[in-house]
Image: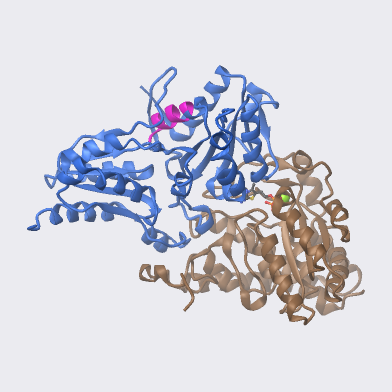
Amino acid sequence: MREISFQKALDEAVAEEMRRDPRIIVMATDFTGDPVKEFGPARVRFTPISEAVLTGMGLGAAGCGFRPIVNWRMVTFSFVAMDQIVNQASKIRYMFGGQADFPVTYRCTTGGGIGLAAQHSQSPYSMWMHLAGLKIILPSTPADAKGLLKSAIRDNNPVVSFECSRLATVTGPVPDGDHLVPIGVAEVKRAGTDVTIVGLAYYVQEALAVAEELVREGISIEVVDPRTLVPMDADTVRASVRKTGRVVIVDEAPATCSAASEISALLVEDPDTFRVLKAPVRRVCAVPVPVPYSPPLERAALPNRDDIKTAVYAVLKDSLRPV
Amino acid sequence: MALDKAQLAQMLRTMILIREFDELAIQLRVAGKIYGAVHPYVGQEAVAVGVCSNFKVSDRVTSTHRGHGHCIAKGADIRRMMAELFGRVDGYCKGKGGSMHIADFAVGMLGANGIVGGGLPIACGAALAAQLEGKGDVTVCFFGDGAAAEGEFHEALNIASVWKLPIVFVCENNQYAANNAVAVQHPRVDIAAHAGAYQIPGVVADGNDVLEVYAAAGDAVARARRGEGPSLLEGKTYRWHFHAMRATPPPETRPSDEIASWKARDPIARLEQHALGAGALSAAEMSAIRERVKADLDDAVAFAEASPFPDPKDLLVDMFAE
Ligand SMILES: Cc1ncc(C[n+]2csc(CCOP(=O)(O)OP(=O)(O)O)c2C)c(N)n1
Ligand SMILES: [Mg+2]
């Protein structure tokens, strides 16, 4: 299979969908490559730095028959458009009784770990999860990035695509042809029997690396990637945890009210999963602090492989305690 | 408003320092000694220096992602700036902020900002504080041409006008926001024209002529001090380098003749010529200034390198006030 980068996979997804459907237009302050050449300036729109209006325009044009893709570039910049995201995009369809569809895709990079300091190192997807009304994808591999973004563009609802900065240059196999990954379907990235690690975005690859290391210690890890945060595929995550009885959830957002919290709740509030849990759920998340610039501080703020291993040992140890 | 020799020398020194500081920052980033993103201010020195030369320490500024020049012009210590770029404990933000988030509240530099337009509302708040204090202090808000497309720009101008806030909005129109030329983003290339809608003075200055900026900003600052309200001052200028770099400088995307024509209007060379022509500074004095700047920068790097990295144990220090 072809190996391409995460970034290239995303670019391909947009280009293929634009070829398929002339109603797709893209708006951003900048683009990778030269999409104007193929699709022309009417469909590829360089914008002023005006996130609020772009976000709302995407919604408005979507409600009037187009399929806009608005790229905020960094999720950081989307906060300027809070009203359009929170009060408008997430509510518009339901509030008006389903009179129109709003097939708009909002794209943004997310995450820290590259020395960009507090404002440019955020992972706020749980803020969006909370809204009820936005679908959210968060891929961890080039293949998923391409397949999920294509599905997002074809979805008839506002979908937010979070694209992890640390994965941009990561390469991986991507199937040829019209490769689609359905929204709302998690994937077991590695099968195992002792502990489930639920990883998000960059931390899927970190979880896989930890799983590989722990083979030597005789620990068998299953790695599950939700891939979509809304709607969350609770069944797949629960099935894995019912098999292993132990779970560590890893993400680079702080734990408070996070995707990791939500996954944890989905596990423990399910009676069949709760009954077979051998140890308390563990979350490995960022320290609740604005991500600092200086490398030693940034490293201390974000989870790493040692933190994941420590949590794996902990759930194994916790489960040995007498009840 | 003729400037005396000491004032001219001070302006020239600050402009050279800003330029060399950012040229050095590029090298340090390429060498991997500093991290994250660097947005060089090279070419725009006359705006920061022309504006800030009107200031008292108690006046305040807000800055942008391209903020090193504003910081130096407002009187920050380059040793602590450099230590911040190096991510060390003696940096202004103890290594927490880096290039895009340098601040020195002691000299009224209220912070660089990673958000385009993010400083405008904060500057209005500082101006409100100054208005309430009633001591005649002024706030200057630096922002780029790109920021004028953000709602925060319009909200800030509107309220500042209605409340007659003692603020000067200084737009550094360097002709581009990242890779987008001004004409792609704005119906008219003069950002100052927005002033009319808010019934405040709007002035365009040659942003590569420090004396012109100094005079125009002087009028606006004086007006604000008198309690007559805000002004919008636009300095037409140009950045000599790329918009931003991380590990390596990105390729140039702007027309080479355009770059050449702006470099021919080098704000530092123009001030040097003026000072020479007016007999205010000799060539020897000017080369002494350059040598002094070089020594100061060497000293700043040595200071930064000698400063330790923050202890990961201190990660949560500064989260909340006592
Ligand atoms: C709200 C927001 N949107 C987008 C960005 C990304 N960005 C950083 S600098 C920049 C260009 C800013 O242009 P301008 O205001 O003219 O300032 P200049 O870089 O030219 O100094 C952009 C788009 C940002 N930092 N904040
Ligand atoms: Mg600009």
In what quadrant of the picture does the N terminus of chain A appear?
A: top left
Question: Which stretch did the figure color magenta?
Answer: A141-151
In what quadrant of the picture does the C terminus of chain A appear?
A: bottom left
Q: Can residue B17 be seen at all in this image of the molecule?
A: no
Q: Where is residue A6 shown, x and y percent of the image?
A: 44, 34
* Viewer-proximal residue among B190 and A283: A283
- Which residue: 39% across, 71% down? B314
Q: Where is residue A112 shown, x and y percent of the image?
A: 45, 52
In this image, A297 relative to B291: left or right?
left
Residue B101 placement: quadrant: bottom right
- Magenta stretch encompasses residue B135: no
* Viewer-proximal residue among A77 and B206: A77
Q: Can residue A162 be seen at all in this image of the molecule?
A: yes
- Which residue: 72% across, 57% down? B143
Task: Indicate the colouring scheme.
Answer: by chain
Chain letter for blue, please.
A
- Magenta stretch encompasses residue A142: yes
Predominant SS along the magenta part:
helix
In this image, B18 relative to A261: left or right?
right
According to the rendering, which colour does chain B have?
A: brown
Q: Where is residue A209 shown, x and y percent of the image?
A: 27, 43
